[in-house]
Amino acid sequence: MVDGHGDDAYRYGAIRLNFSSNIPSFVDLSALEDHLRGCLSVIRSYPEPSARRLEAKIAAAVGRCADEVLVTSGATEGIYLIAQSLSLTLPQGKGTYSVLQPTFSEYDSACRMYGLRETEDGELCWLCNPNNPTGEVWDEDVVRTLAQRHRWLVVDQSYEDYTMSSLPAVDDAPNIITLHSMTKKFCIPGLRLGYVTASAEVIALLRSLCRPWSVNALALEAGLWLVEHRPQLVDMPRYLAEAQRLRSMLNRIPGVQVRETQTNFMLGTIEARTAAELKEHLARRHGILIRDAGNFPGLSPHHFRVAAQRPEDNDELVQAIMNYEL
């Protein structure tokens, strides 16, 4: 696992505004919190060794069979299980993978942990859609082409709820494995909850590698409640419009350039300073946290990433960057 992801507020004293995570921080989780307060007694017992009740509820909600769904401790556990499974199905040192960069670093980390080698046409291909950190959405032609070129295609749809673009339907392709993040969908990063959808054969293999009790009891209770109630936490059209407003404002700052995005987060560059310098200044002087994106493969020390928050928070971020000596 790479050190240096977003949301590292623990490194600082007092962070007031967090733009470093790709999750909106302003949502109202009071109903879920009230439910969990009434469930605290579950911590006195072990959770289910595997999350079969939650898997059944998710399967019914997404129109799949229960044996085609595997609940994980965040989508990241699914990434490592997939890399491990490929390493076990091939002779040692023969497993290969491909990644479309720049993208989430854990694909590389997981594959290297299990001895897989990166090649242009690896047996396993990783595609983040929408892509972190660029905010790009890949269309169906790209997904289908990659599925035909590689033995397995993993489509990480952790940010599937944060775009107005139509994502390709991939359930009919037997060699596609899809990652989903309840952490992102319901803004609960501290609970670590995700799931994998794939053919029953692939899910059975992944399940055989799972550690028992990997998903804790409170996370399971939260998952069951969320699937049943499906709260609408974000007015997505308004929120994504606000993200575009933030991008426009940032692009008006001399020395700052921000790429087009189809989701709530965006990738930018700062010319005269490094992203690390900008991050430290904003954190120490303003209590504002952004993501230094310089550790994404293919990006430079001048790249940073921010996710839109409330309009007044976005205005404050822009003003703080404008006042920084660029």
Image: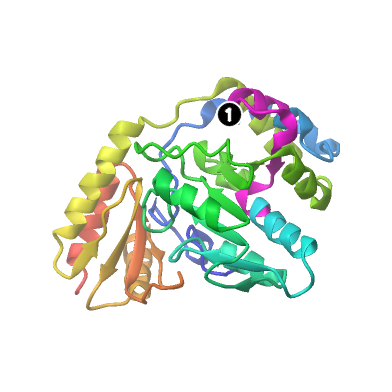
Local secondary structure at mark 1:
helix
Q: Position of residue 256 (x, y in %)?
A: 21, 66
Which image quadrant is residue 232 in? top left
What colour scheme was applied to this rendering of the protein?
Answer: rainbow
Q: Position of residue 226 (x, y in %)?
A: 59, 28
**Kind of residue at badge 1:** Leu
Q: Position of residue 23 (x, y in %)?
A: 45, 46
Q: Position of residue 134 (x, y in %)?
A: 37, 57
Residue at image point 45% right, 66% down = 101
On screen, residue 63 above or below 290? above
Taking the image as shown, residue 31 lies to the left or right of residue 285, namely right
Quadrant housing the C terminus = bottom left
Which image quadrant is residue 245 in? top left
On screen, residue 303 above or below 80? below
**Closest to the observer, 122 or 100:** 122
What predominant SS class does the magenta segment belong to? helix
Magenta stretch: give its range: 56-77
Residue at image point 60% right, 46% down = 176
Taking the image as shown, residue 305 lies to the left or right of residue 91, namely left
Say if residue 215 shows up in the picture. Answer: no
Say if residue 177 shows up in the picture. Answer: yes
Residue on which the image places disc 1: 32
Residue at image point 32% right, 74% down = 302
Sort mark 1 into few (<14), some (14-19) or many (20+) by Cα contacts within 10 Å.
Answer: some
Q: Residue furthest front?
A: 148
Which image quadrant is residue 59 in? top right
Residue at image point 30% right, 51% down = 261
- The question of residue 241 being in magenta is answered with no
- The question of residue 64 being in magenta is answered with yes
**Closest to the observer, 18 or 262:** 262
Taking the image as shown, residue 147 lies to the left or right of residue 92, namely left
